[in-house]
Image (spheres, coloured by chain):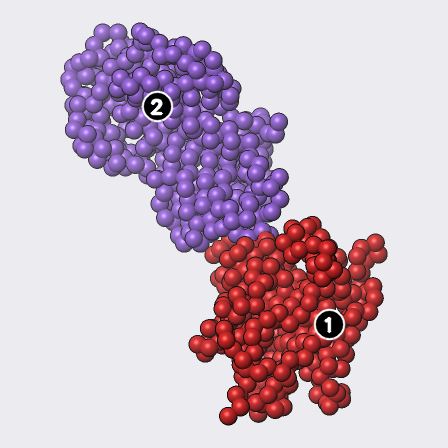
Chain colours: A purple, B red
Amino acid sequence: MTDTPGFTVDVDQNSYLPAGGSQVDAIVTVTMAGGPEAGAAADGAAPTPTGDGLEMIIVDCSTSMSGDKIMSARRATAAAIAELRDGVSFTVIAGTQHAALVYPPFVGTATADAGTRAEATAQVARLAANGATGIGAWLTFAGRIADQHPGAIKHAILLTDGQNGEHPSQFAAALDACLGKFTCDCRGVGTDWRVDELRAISSALLGTVDIVANPSDLAADFRAIMGTAMGKVLADVALRLWTPRGATVRFVKQVAPTVADLTARRTESGTQRGDYPLGSWGAESRDYHIEVQVTPGVVGDEILAGRVSLVRASSDTVLTNTVLTNTVLAQGLIRAIWTDDTALSTRISRGVAHYTGQAELAEAIQDGLAARKAGDGPTATARLGRAVALAAASGNEGTARLLERVVDVIDAPSGTVRLRAGVTAADEMTLDTRSTKTIRVRGES
Amino acid sequence: VGEPCPHCAAPTGTTDQFCEGCGVDLRVRRRDRTDRVEIDLGALAGVSDRGRVHVRNEDAMALGHGTAVGHETAVGQRTAGRSAARLAAVVCDGVSTVHSPELASRAAAESALDVLLSARSAPDRPAEHRTRDAVAAAARAVAALPAPSGRDAPSCTLVSALVDRSDPDLPEITVAWVGDSRAYWLAGAGAAEPARLLTADHSWVAEMVAAGVLDVATAMADVRAHAITQWLGADGEPEPGVVTLRPAGSGALLLCSDGLWNYLPDADGLAAVAVPTIERGTGALDAAAALTAVALAGGGRDNITAVVIPITVRSPS
């Protein structure tokens, strides 16, 4: 394991509880070294991506893609192909009610080099829009290809413009079968697709979801996605959480860069121990909010309420961090200390407070938009108003701006808003897809 | 492999910082093993518990009979050749505001018990004199403890009982106390020897009430409520209270720290918890545990210690 990149785990929490208290919250920041600010790798350089990767570009070729959209999809796919690093395996898949290989022209995958990139680009120029939309079939097809590349960093870009035509149970089964096989970033072009469908895919397959309302923006977006994908150096990372006997894990949520609930994704990996999939990693940093309910203690008790380490998924390979010649476990300790000093036990950690607000912000937006769609004006006003207040209080300006296109803000701090008439579908869907985007806090004020 | 976890008994590694079972910080817990001590000598038993609030258990108890002596965690139980003629118990409560109160209470309890049960020195010395000797020995032991300059010297309370059963039908009980640890006689309603408090606290509250200055409720609400006016320590010779009791009927003697009686000061109330347990034949330890549980359920604001000595008196036929 000499090539293991350096992971660090930091814990932000208030470990003090009042007598009888049992709820322990912590923000756990997982960082893979690399980039000028981290510098934990021995030579100070970013970890070197390995050649062992698989990229799958899945393009919706249903009839509704005709015109601008399919032309933009061709350009975007070509832009993504141009980003492929030499040595990476790749394939381009056309999706209708079935999935069909566009490139390579034989079964399997091509290995990226100047020649294959040029061939693939030429093939992509012939993509045509003709058929229905069967996203489950596309995923199943991609999953089979991924099966041929064990151990590789496997990633897909999925582009669609419409809602899925498959039976929901068929789609759900196909998605379920792909869990852990590859990660998938989803993009919806135009405004005829369903945010909840693509969000289901991106959260199950540990990727991102976004709207590209204007087809002409697609190429830049694909280029960015592929650039990020090429920066991933380690596949199948899992967060391992040990908790004391009798404790309950209330939730494990990614809270930055976006909110994603991982609680239900737990697989037991030993006594009092479970693993949560984190997908692939590059030089990046993500925050997780963990809440554990422990057996209440008495004043003076001090326990370990949780131990976070990083492992390769479905293995006991614990990931480490090598600083010069010392290899240390990438591990974070969540503690609970019971005290009768209320000045200590009533403090809420800045990180916990912030991310509790950011998670509620995402929830308020999604609730508000759902109520708005259902014609429930009072609920929509209340929830979107709450979202405006939370976005303002936390300084999440990006989300605040998106909210302003859906509601008229009368007073942001109190969350007093009026629903706007004539909101465009694009604005509404943009707010919905980006509702989970959070901003980070750093250090003490 | 290290010693089992003191909290949950799970196996631990010698270098583990935390128990892999319950997560307890082993470096904290390994400092002191007096969180909960139970001593069962059959004829008498005691429970000492840290309670739910205090970080340490600063109470201590020592108990024994003619053939066995137990204090803290070390319980020496030898097979008695005959029924022991003499039983003794000591409960001490360290004064929290001083240096090393837990050492004071331990030293006092152990040295007092040694004198109470000593067979070598003056076996025929009257019980009251032996009891006063025991308190004096405890006071010396506490005074001899090291105290850093500028800090209050270690000090503690004491309540002791010496039960003489040389006439098995008519036991004689000698109780001594310093401070606010108490002895109670516990008996069922209508018993020949009624349940009652045997000691009178050496405390600010008791003095205010005795002088007629304040009523009990007002005095207990004062910040000085728990201040004691007598203690064992470096600063002065204590003047213990001493009482002798020859019970007319069966019951039990209870020695306890204020961590118990603050929750249940009434002798009949204490008897209602302990006496049925003893009468069911489940033993002195169960009675002591039941009493301790009352204080824990009430909040356990202080360390709790209860020693129970069942007393059988044969009724005149």
Return the x and y of residue B277 as percentages of the image width and height. Answer: 47, 73
Above/below status of B224 relative to A182: below
- Could you tell me which secondary element the residue under label 1 belongs to? strand
Residue at image coords 50%, 18%: A413
Residue at image coords 65%, 56%: B216
Above/below status of B7 relative to A302: below
The chain letter under disc 1 is B
Snapshot quadrant of residue A84 = top left
Question: Left or right of B305: which side holds B115?
Answer: right
Task: Give the residue type at disc 1.
Answer: Gly
Task: Give the residue type at disc 2.
Answer: Gln
Of marks 2 and 1, the one in the foreground: 1
Q: Nearer the viewer, residue A131 or A423?
A: A423
The chain letter under disc 2 is A
Q: Which residue is mark 2?
A: A366
Question: What is the C-alpha distance between the residues marked 2 and 1?
Answer: 74 Å
Q: Which residue is mark 1?
A: B241
Please tell me how crowded label 1 is: few (under 14), some (14-19), or many (20+) other residues with Cα within 10 Å: some
Image quadrant in which the C terminus of chain A is located? top right
Snapshot quadrant of residue B288 = bottom right
Q: Residue furthest front?
A: B212
Snapshot quadrant of residue A137 = top left
